Amino acid sequence: MARVLILGGTAEAAELAARLAGDDRLETVTSLAGLTRLPNRPAGQVRQGGFGGPHGLAALLKEEGYGALVDATHPFAAQIAHHAAEAAEAAGIPRLKLVRPPFERKEDIRFVPVASMEEASAAIPSGARVFLAAGRRELAPFAARKDIWCLLRMIEPPAPGEVLPPGELVLGRPAADPETEMELLQTHRIDHLVSKDSGGRAGAKIEAARRLGLPVILIERPPVPPGDSAGTVDECIVWLERTLFRAREEIGRV
């Protein structure tokens, strides 16, 4: 039986774990950072917490006999992506980066590309009403802007005393359909959207902004480490089949 470690926390990671759960040739473990509570526990085994950097992850991969590492973390989780690449190389096992495609660059979407949250904050005109799709650790540049109004959406409520930009907070996950996102934007009279280029389900708000003709200040993705990559769970499963099982079969025929 081959062991696979999935670095999770995304919908793609959960889907991958669910689809691999029925394969009796595999034992899967999904690792979660534990920053956000997930609505459903991934299939298979689950571990929570850090590894102690790339050296700690490499040691775990060796000691627990993993045959492959799938990094299915968020497209903006740059540090763990590089740690995963370094650890897999040190452990001598194959690694795949599963990363969803970026938002489609349609001609009628008013994208304003920027490299960071600081640049995004600076790009917002005074007096704007902004839908701010950002993590709680990324709000400081916007909290300093007292001349804008921000609509924030968080999965979990902020901690007591946490500094937020001026505006309003709504709790919940992103809607999957553009109509619901359009209603949210129109209700709060939003005229600018700030978003990471996270892709996936978050595309509903981008489509809503397109239909409403709103500018989208888009934080570009960090580059991924060199190596094997896949854009879908299907491609990841093909990679695992080829990497873990076909290679063994070919060796057995030699």
Image (tube, rainbow, N blue to C red):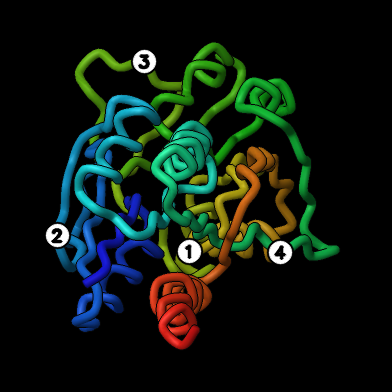
Q: Do the residues labelled 2 and 3 touch (CB within 8 Å)?
A: no
C-alpha span from label 4 to label 1: 12 Å
Q: Say whether residue 191 is left or right of residue 53.
A: right
In the image, residue 173 sits, relative to residue 220, either above or below, namely below
Q: Position of residue 6 (x, y in %)?
A: 33, 56
Number of residues whose C-alpha sits closer than 10 Å to that of mark 2, classed few (under 14), some (14–19) or many (20 or more): some
The x and y percentages for residue 225 are 61, 42
Q: Which three-letter amino acid code belongs to the residue tagged 3?
A: Val
Determine the residue positioned at 50% across, 60% down.
Answer: 98
Secondary structure beneath label 3: loop
3D distance between C-alphas at marks 1 and 2: 25 Å
**In this rendering, the label closer to the viewer, 3 or 4:** 4
Quick one: quadrant of the N terminus? Answer: bottom left
Q: Do the residues bearing badges 3 and 1 touch, measured as CB atoms within 8 Å?
A: no
Q: Please tell me whether mark 4 sits on a helix, a strand or a loop.
A: loop
**Quadrant of the rendered structure where residue 44 is?**
bottom left
Return the mark for residue 163.
3
Q: Residue at x 28, y 44 (%)?
A: 62
Sequence-earlier tag: 3 or 4: 4
Q: Is residue 60 above or below residue 1?
A: above
Q: Can residue 141 be seen in this view?
A: yes
Judging by the rendered image, the residue that carries numbered circle 2 is: 45
Q: Where is residue 92 in the image (x, y as percent from the top left)?
A: 44, 47
Q: What element carries label 2?
A: strand
SS for callout 1: helix
Quarter-of-image position of residue 218: top right
In front of the other: label 2 or label 4? Answer: 2
Q: Along the polypeptide, which appears first: circle 2 or circle 3?
A: 2
- Name the residue tied to disc 4: 104
Q: Nearer the viewer, residue 129 or 70?
A: 70
Q: Nearer the N terminus, badge 1 or badge 2?
A: 2
Q: Name the residue under label 1.
A: 201
